[in-house]
Image: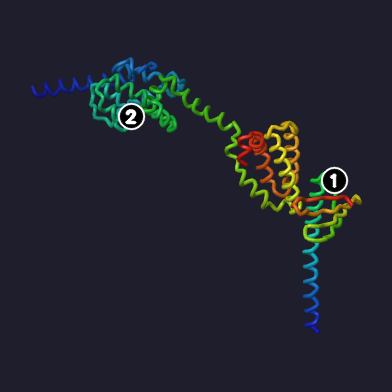
Amino acid sequence: MRYAAVAVLCVCGALAGCGAFHSRAKPVTPPPVADQPGSQAVANRAQPVADDGASPSAPAPVADQTESAPRSDQASSPTNSTKAGPKTNPAPTSKPSVATAPNSRSQSAVASSSAPTSDTTSRNAGSSSATTAAAGKSVAPPPSAPPPPPAAQATPAPSSAVPQPAALDLAGLEQRLKDTAAIGLFSKLSLKNQVDDLLGQFRTFHGGKVPPTLSQLRQKYDVLLMKVLSLLQDGDPALAQAISTSREALWGILSDPQKFAKL
Amino acid sequence: MSRSIYRRALVSLVLVSSGGLALADDVSIGKDLGATIALQGMPCDKVVESKRNGDSDYTATCKDGNRYHVFVDPSGRVVVKKL
């Protein structure tokens, strides 16, 4: 009798284990995880990995899944939750809510939401473990996941490409020009005189008087800047470069009546 | 004998160094004056001689023969006049 009971228990345990194994081993279709409950969600998650084109590695995840079943249990609680097995896996590591949520759908939704983060880490690791497979599978579903990063990356680019007059250190440039040894005393005085003359003409322009026109002022501004750069380019190339890059920013300040008034 | 030689050497060394410093100063002033003349839009390829008339007051002779009076007026402006 005892032997019979033991045999029955062993058979039941074997059947349960085999069922779990098969559920994990199945290739998974692209997961709309929230829509598919239970083991089907797990199966769906498994597929994208194969679909991503890592054909040589396709068998690997399957094989790895068997080996790293515990890892998958740990990384993706929804898989565990879908199974009849224990729910005591360290889901909190991924998300605490996952461990507490009893429903497979909610857990799968959470897993899908957390997929990108785990997917990035898994991709970086380059491992073919079930965790990476599951994470990658869960990432594959959200086509929305990849786009946001490029969009996020794209948004800074335009801002960086646009010249920023606000970043111009006018006081710093002025001090550097005063302190530079590339220009002699008489040359500095002469440049100062010419700068003062140009500022007076700008003041006249912003006062509403027609001559000089803005185009004439622009020509004088360019000529004066060329004089300064020609004196600096040999003796102080760094300052020459700084002034050259600040050309448009300086013009923006001079041509704007409000900014010019603050000088 | 050796002391007198030593003193003469020392004096000559001082004279040479001071002359060198003055020469370097002349070169820098010449460049500055040449740049100043050019900033005013006047022709002067290279200043070969500069004479100090007073504080911030110089007479520059260019290689092409032009001579200029470069000074700072009371209002602080640099003035370049062709002589």
Residue B60 in percent (x, y) is at 85, 55
Amino acid type indicated by mark 2: Ala
Residue A88 in percent (x, y) is at 24, 29
Q: Is residue A101 above or below residue A183?
A: above
Q: Is residue A256 visible?
A: yes
Q: How many marks?
A: 2
Picture residue at 73% right of the left edge, 43% below the top: A197
Query: Which image quadrant is residue A21 in?
Result: top left
Q: Which mark is residue A172?
A: none
- Comparing labels 1 and 2, the label whose residue is closer to the camera: 1
**Residue in front for this viewpoint, B82 or A200:** A200
Residue B18 in percent (x, y) is at 78, 67
Q: How crowded is mark 1: few (under 14 residues within 10 Å), some or many (20 or more)?
A: some
Picture residue at 69% right of the left edge, 32% below the top: A208
Amino acid type indicated by mark 1: Met
Chain letter for mark 2 = A
Query: Which image quadrant is residue A118 in?
Result: top left
Outermost residue toward the right in this view = B65
| Mark 1 secondary-structure assignment | loop
**Residue A213 as seen in the image, left or right of residue A146:** right
Residue A182 in percent (x, y) is at 72, 51
Q: Residue A75 carries which label?
A: 2
Q: Residue B42 carries which label?
A: 1
Chain letter for mark 1 = B
Q: In this view, does A129 lie above or below A198?
A: above
**Residue A252 as seen in the image, left or right of residue A131:** right
Picture residue at 90% right of the left edge, 50% below the top: B66
